[in-house]
Image (cartoon, rainbow, N blue to C red):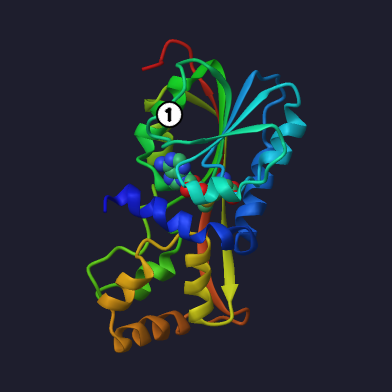
């Protein structure tokens, strides 16, 4: 299975549990909605829409626009809230089935960290008109560091994706023909009662990169115990920490840079 197919199937497996487990994702999405530019729009994309956390907010903000919710996970699209006049499209953000210069707003909450950043940003730039807005949230280097550390040396898998450093994000934006109007970042720590709850929560939001079966096959009971012990060793008064380096970006498609 290719990397992208593994990510897609992980989100599809998580689709029915996602909305209940994704408290932080909802807050991040709501904060991104607050940063939307004050302008009108003809076509608005919710890229990596998941179960549709942004749907109501995007409709309220752009009531006259055509709304298109895009995700490459059929499971997520099936779980997407319906009845809001949104067209749901199953497509990969790296290759969108949309004409160049057709969209005014690309809204994307917590999807880009799963993508090849320069490729996905260039594709967003292609579908945006000059002056169109790319509004996204993502996570940066340091996110889920506790999980990476807990599994270090125990198997051959990476258990999280390689999240970009802030400089790499800024460079990818500029290199894809965007001018950043706003970049905001913030560290957030979630706390869990125990290691099992921490790892399960990561699976429920689709963020676990190794399928459950493969994890069991690769990690014996002793190694899994070690993972739990390493997570447990970090316990604080509020529980076991899991770190997110969050970022919100509003960028404009500069003229003349469409590839
Ligand atoms: C963490 S969820 C966020 C969902 C939603 N935006 C939210 O705020 O709840 C990430 C979503 O991005 C989708 N996704 C990841 N990579 C994608 C890609 N290359 N193309 C399209 N969708 C993708 C996943 O299927 C998943 O639904």
Q: Quick check: can you spot residue 213?
A: yes
Q: Quick check: can you spot residue 34?
A: no
Q: Which of 232 and 41 is in front in this view?
A: 41
Number of disc labels = 1
**Residue 220 sits above or below residue 46 on the image:** below
In-image side of 214 versus 205 (left or right): left
Quarter of the figure that contains the C terminus: top left
In-image side of 229 versus 85 (left or right): left
* Residue shown at 49% from the left, 17% from the top: 254
x and y, in percent, of residue 130 in the image:
52, 14
Quarter of the figure with residue 132: top right
Q: Which of 222 and 15 is in front in this view?
A: 15
Q: Label 1 neighbourhood size at 10 Å, few (<14), some (14-19), many (20+)?
A: some
* Residue shown at 64% from the left, 63% from the top: 20
In-image side of 180 versus 149 (left or right): right
x and y, in percent, of residue 228 in the image:
42, 83
Q: Look at mark 1 in the image and give the residue it sits on.
A: 96
Question: Element under label 1?
Answer: loop
């Amino acid at each position: 299975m290719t990397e992208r197919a593994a990510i897609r199937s992980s989100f599809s497996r998580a689709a029915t549990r996602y909305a209940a487990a994704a408290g932080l994702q909802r807050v991040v999405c709501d904060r991104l909605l607050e940063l939307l530019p004050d302008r009108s729009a003809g076509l608005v994309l919710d890229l990596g829409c998941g179960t549709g956390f942004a749907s109501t907010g995007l409709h309220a903000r752009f009531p006259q626009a055509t709304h298109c919710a895009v995700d490459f996970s059929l499971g997520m699209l099936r779980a997407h809230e319906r009845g809001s006049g949104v067209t749901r499209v199953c497509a990969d953000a790296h290759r969108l089935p949309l004409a160049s210069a057709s969209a005014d707003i690309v809204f994307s909450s917590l999807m880009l960290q799963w993508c090849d950043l320069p490729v996905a940003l260039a594709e967003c730039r292609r579908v945006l008109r000059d002056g169109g807005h790319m509004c996204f949230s993502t996570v940066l280097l340091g996110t889920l560091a506790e999980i990476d550390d807990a599994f270090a040396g125990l198997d051959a898998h990476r258990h999280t994706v390689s999240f970009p450093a802030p400089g790499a994000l800024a460079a990818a934006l500029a290199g894809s023909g965007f001018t950043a109007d706003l970049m905001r970042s913030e560290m957030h720590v979630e706390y869990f009662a125990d290691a099992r709850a921490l790892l399960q929560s990561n699976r429920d939001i689709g963020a676990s990169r190794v399928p459950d079966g493969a994890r069991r096959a690769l990690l014996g009971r002793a190694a899994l115990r070690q993972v739990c012990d390493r997570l447990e060793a970090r316990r604080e008064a509020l529980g076991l920490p899991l770190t997110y380096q969050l970022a919100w970006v509003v960028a404009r498609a500069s003229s003349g840079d469409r590839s």
